[in-house]
Image (tube, rainbow, N blue to C red):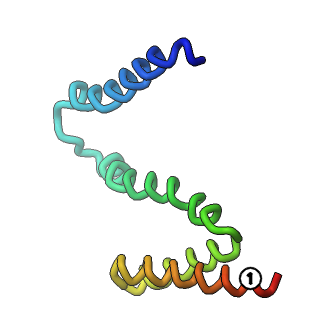
Amino acid sequence: MNDNIYLYILVMAGVTYLIRMLPLTLIKKEIKNTYIKSFLYYVPYVTLSVMIFPAILTATASAWSGAAALVAATVLAYRGKSLFQVSTAACAVVFVLEWALEFLL
């Protein structure tokens, strides 16, 4: 594998470039289909959620503290709190639960 590392990097760069370049060159007119437009609108949000969700549960020492922080952050975000308030509350929940679990176990 170490012998072909530059080949792997070149192939990954080519694939990444093609994925970004082909839609710009092949689709020249405006997309009018409402289903496709709504699908493309939500793609960044879904991608970010899929990348973040597993990390929330595995980034802490206990999956319980990660799950509790997820619930707290979801409730605060749903109520319209700022990103700073949501992230601070989630960190506080993890801190308190990890501290409590340390003494209980």
Classify residue 100 as left or right of residue 73: right
Quadrant in which the C terminus is drawn = bottom right
What amino acid does circle 1 point to?
Leu
Of residue 17 and residue 2, the one placed in the foreground of this image is 2
Classify residue 92 as left or right of residue 41: right
Corner quadrant of residue 20: top left
Of residue 52 and residue 100, the one placed in the foreground of this image is 100
Classify residue 58 as left or right of residue 92: right
* Residue shown at the point (48%, 59%) measured from the top left: 49
| 8 versus 34 height, above or below | above
Residue 31 in percent (x, y) is at 23, 42
Q: Dot 1 surroundings within 10 Å: few (below 14), some, or many (20 or more)?
A: some
User: Is label 1 in a helix, a strand or a loop?
Assistant: helix
Residue 18 in percent (x, y) is at 33, 24
* Residue shown at the point (59%, 79%) measured from the top left: 94
Residue 90 in percent (x, y) is at 51, 79
* Residue shown at the point (22%, 31%) measured from the top left: 24
